[in-house]
Amino acid sequence: MQEENTDYKKLLTEVIKKQIVVLGPDITLTKARNVKGLTIENDGTVSQMSGNPQELIQELINQFVQLSGQIVEKTMEPLLANYHLKENRKISNSIETGPSNPGAGS
């Protein structure tokens, strides 16, 4: 379980650092720190996490999807494909469809 948590921290950190490149550190860290259960250092490293890792990943991605939609979708797909964590398929599908928002259409 500890090893899996380390993998989740690495994934979360990579997501944040990738967004720092795209959006800049101020916006990225502000959005990432909106996710309850994550402690994030100024360089984007996730130093602590508490709660369900899948939910934390989903909430983090939702923060960025709300902000920049398809840009995030395209940057996250290859990153998530590199990790073989439980239920990544569910997360990837959520990225493709966006956060649940009844009535929102393309």
Image (cartoon, grey):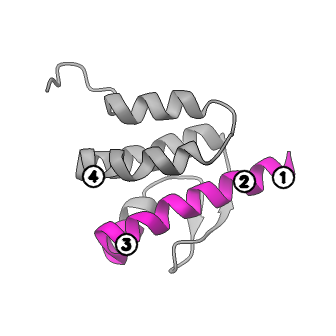
Q: Which residues are magenta?
A: 1-29
Say which of 79 and 32 sits in front: 79
**In-front residue for pair 100/77:** 77
Q: Is residue 13 part of the magenta span, yes or no?
A: yes
Q: Which residue is mark 4?
A: 71
| Residue corresponding to mark 2 | 7
Residue 96: image location, x then y, percent = 35, 32
Q: Determine which residue is flagged by label 1.
A: 3
Q: Can residue 49 be seen here?
A: no
Q: Which residue is mark 3?
A: 21
- Helix, strand or loop for disc 3: helix
Q: Is residue 39 above or below residue 61?
A: below
- Residue at figure coordinates x 14%, y 27% from the top left: 106
Q: Is mark 2 in CB contact (under 8 Å) with mark 1?
A: yes
Q: In this orientation, which residue lies closer to the viewer: 4 or 75?
A: 75
Examine the rendered structure and indicate whether residue 66 appears above or below residue 97: below
Which mark, by number, is residue 34?
none
Amino acid type of the residue that numbered disc 3 sits on in the rendered structure: Val
Q: Main secondary structure of the magenta part?
A: helix
Name which residue lies at 46% across and 50% down.
Answer: 60
Mark 3 or mark 1: whose residue is earlier in sequence: 1
* Disc 4/disc 1 C-alpha distance (Å): 30 Å
Left or right: 3 with respect to 32? right
Task: Tell me if 4 is positioned left or right of 51 in this view.
Answer: right
